[in-house]
Amino acid sequence: MASRKEAPSGKSLDSPVRQIQIEGLVRPHHQALQGSEVVQGVLLGLVVEDRLEITNCFPFPQHTEDDADFDEVQYQMEMMRSLRHVNIDHLHVGWYQSTFYGSFVSRALLDSQFSYQHAIEESVVLIYDPIKTAQGSLCLKAYRLTPKLMEICREKDFSADGLKKASVGYENMFEEVPIVIKNSHLINVLLWELEDKSTAADKHELLNLSSSTHLEKSLQMLMDRVDEMSQDIVKYNNYCRSLSKQQQQKHQYIQRRQQENAQRQSRGEPPLPEEDLSKMFKPPQPPPRMDTLLIASQLSTYCQTIKEFTSQNLGKLFMAEALQGTSSYS
Amino acid sequence: MSRFFATGSDSESEESSSADEITPKATGTTFNKNKEAFTTNLILCCPLRFRFEELTNIIKTIRNAMKIRDMSKCLEEFEQLYRAFLKSKTIVDKEGVPQFYIRLLADLEDYLNQLWEDKEGKKKMNKNNAKALSTLRQKIRKYNKDFETEIASYKEVLNSSTNVISLCRCQDEESESDDDEDSEDWGSDSVDSGGESEDNEGAAASLAVVFLKKYKDGRRKRHKKIEQVEEEVDEDGEAEEGGWEKVKGGVPLVKEKPKMFAKGTEINSAVVIKKLTEILQARGKKGTDRAAQIELLHALSGISNENNLGQGILVKIKFNIIASLYDYNTNLAAFMKPEMWKKCLECIDELLDILFENNNIFIGENIAEDSENLAISDQPFRVRGCILTLVERMDEEFTKIMQNTDPHSQEYVDNLKDEGRVCGIIDRLLQYLESKGSTEEVCRIYLRRIMHTYYKFDYKAHRQLLPWVTGPFSEQDQEESEGEDSAIIMDRLCKFIYAKDRTDRIRTCAILCHIYHHALHSRWYQARDLMLMSHLQDNIQHADPPVQILYNRTMVQLGICAFRQGMIKDAHNALLDIQSSGRAKELLGQGLLMRNMQERNAEQEKIEKRRQVPFHMHINLELLECVYLVSAMLLEIPYMAAHEFDARRRMISKQFHHQLRVGERQPLLGPPESMREHVVAASKAMKMGDWRTCHSFIINEKMNSKVWDLFPETQCVREMLVRKIQEESLRTYLFTYSSVYDSISMETLSEMFELELPTVHSIISKMIINEELMASLDQPTQTVVMHRTEPTSLQNMALQLAEKLGGLVENNERVFDLKQGVYGGYFNRGTRTRP
């Protein structure tokens, strides 16, 4: 396990960072907090050619309500200064966040990643799922906003038209950056040793068949998002309807006006003064599309995780069936 | 002008009192001066007097306001005075500015200046007053400039007045004799000619402002004279009335009993009747002393009694006394004072006595005034009047008194003791009308009787129904049980009304009361059948609010009755309407909800207040809510357990769910305190199938004292509840945990829930038949074998998700349609790809 390479995505990424190399040392330190709380932290490292090397990280302190005036920026600066003293890379290259069952796509994530990417072009967000990792499969993903989305965020134009013009769909909001984990030789040695020592029973976890709780949770969350999506669509529907209704009214009004003017002209009277049509017909407020996009994106993430999970489970089930079949034959 | 003509003498007495008030302010010297001024005015024409009178009236109020330092009132009146003065400009031009006017202006200015200087006092004044003070001060300063010379001369006189006190004394003596002459003149005048006498009297009125302390003596003399005059003109009706009015006005001062008839008049029925009409004519007029009128009527009845004028007249007078007792409060919202109320009860009692003793008196509303026969003769008496209306009014007054008494005071208890008397009167009238009245009247009085009976729990009948309670009867008990059973009375009265009544309202009320009474005494089936037969539920929304309140009360009582009988579903349905709105208090007429004034103005509030049910008829709201929540719990918890994965689950009771949510939102769950918390805690226990905990939450000492002890048959209710809890817990348990079991022995279940085996068997069979539980019964081993046909929770979720996705697609389609402009465009798009 000198360096495990995640399957590099086929599409070429048109961003300064094409690959992320993570030091094995870099592990979010919050395993203890496997509760429902989301933890966040800062990633440190440096850019080498088209590769972003993340070499260290530290968590944001957990907020409690009684230290509301805690200065986070101050803390980060202090921390980075201290790290520089011990000769550790102190370049701020992104942030990480824990997630449960893949629910991380939110407005907050978008906003903070935008500000990171705005300030430091190379920065990424690492999404880490402690529960899944505990179950035996490392779940670590790096995301960046696509340049298109960056453009939109910069202009703050989240209307339907703006999104359409930029041709941003839920598929191309975030780009996933392939991750390579690189460990020091010492750690590799340790891992080899551990693998030798570990018994087969320790690996049973991977074969656990009872997966329904995980699946139920995912389904539950998927359902919630679907509900939200439905609501958004209904809202959009209403908007479209009222818009078209108003258009009709406006059209009728203009026609009437023209007729009247024509009559007046034939009688030799001066035409009616022009009125501000936009004032008379205020267009209805279009519902923000960004939220819907985010929900769609989240939905696709859920679907992805469920798909992965079920395919793994199916594999296990087939395996179990085969095993049972052989045992019954013998 | 006509106003003064009609009550000319009255205004005179008013004037005299005003003179009394002003007396301490006026000084001797001004009197001297003014007298001269006014003696010249004596023969002035009427408009002058009228105007001046108006002015003096206003001045009087200003002076009063000054006394109590009410500046805003002062300002208001001053503006009026100013206007009035302008109106009388022509006269003033002719006659010069009247002295009293100047005097007021001067006094007022002094007074205001004095107030203005008094910084302390100004600070204490409220905002309105302080504002009025400054405006008034400015106004008067400006205004007084026009009268500078007059005021100056007045003040001069005022200053010199101290020197001439002794002088004034002797002048007072003089004035006294003067006054005597004056009044003598007046007395003879009034006999001679109306017009002149009025003039004279008016002059006296203006003089009254001037005359000082000695005036009273003069007045007393005058009274004597009036009496003399009265005797002379006794035959003349008009004069007599006038005379009568005067005496009345004098009552508080002279302290002598009002004289009804002149001495020596032969008192016969004609005279008394005439007197009665006179008194009655004053009724409703402004300025009539209502208390004195009642006194007079009493006196008149005494006189007629003394002179043996016959029962007819007595009845007639009694009618009028009661009517004027009711009249005493002009305001509809105000209630009778206790002494008035006592008097009223006594009067009605006496009236009934007379009616019972004398069989030959006919009373009725339709007897015309002129066809009355009041004199003693061979013919039976005929008297106009309706005793039923009077008694009904009395009943309403009683309700009003009860509404307006604080229900937690001893006073309320004292007032409630009168209920017996009210019932007694109604009973007596009922007997009377049964023999004499028309069916309509009988219906009305029956309804009254019913209204006083339906809400009372008949403990006596209840005791008889429970043979095991009968211990040694005390004597009191036996006495009590001799009375008629209220159920029988209700039955008799209501049936009569059903048969004979032609107005819909009385019948509706009677039915509702009947149902209420049935329900109160746990005769559930009769009550329910009556409710269903009457079809009241369909059209009650068209009834007037009091009937609707009665309907609500009845429904609630019906629901509680069903609960006591263990018919949980019926109880829930009956109470649903009242409880779901959250306005039970208002719907039952037991109090107003706190609402902001936009929704309800003061007028509406008054109306609503009048509809309130007196406290002793209230239905305990906590009991009501508890019964509702417990029955909702017994229905809802098994239902929730059965339909846990149902996407389109409907709630049986929103209110109950609300309570559950409130309970869940609590950050820290302590032991339950209130009734609601108890029910919520019990529901949670029941959800787990833990009937013992549930039982201990529902039935414990706290809940006993709060709710269950309020039922007459507490023990039965509690037993019923325990059984229901056991049964429903069993059902919930089976719903919730059936997926865990492959099979379960019925014996175990019966042990777990402490139910007999047959009961468990029947419950499970019922569940299987209703396809609520996928299982079958294995007879030989007495076990329930579960079947695995139902979808697992994961499958359920997937189904729900599919349903939701279906909805999503449908909505999406609509958006697409809108874009395409064709309905069904999504399906007809053919080869086109989606954008």
Image (tube, coloured by chain):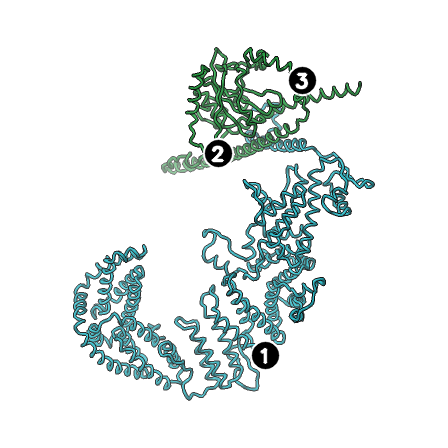
Seen in the image, is B484 located left or right of residue B171? right
Amino acid of disc 3: Thr
Q: Position of residue B785 (x, y in %)?
A: 77, 37
Residue A311 seen in the figure: no
As helix, strand or loop, the secondary structure at mark 1 comes to helix
- Quick check: B581 above or below B71? above
As helix, strand or loop, the secondary structure at mark 3 comes to loop
Q: Nearer the viewer, residue B168 or B714?
A: B714
User: Which disc number belongs to residue B356?
Assistant: 1
What chain is colored cyan? B
Residue pointed to by mark 2? A247
Name the mark nearer the viewer: 3 or 1. 3
At x 29%, y 73%, the residue is B19
Q: Position of residue B811 (x, y in %)?
A: 58, 32
User: Which disc number belongs to residue A199?
Assistant: 3
Which residue is most to the right? B780
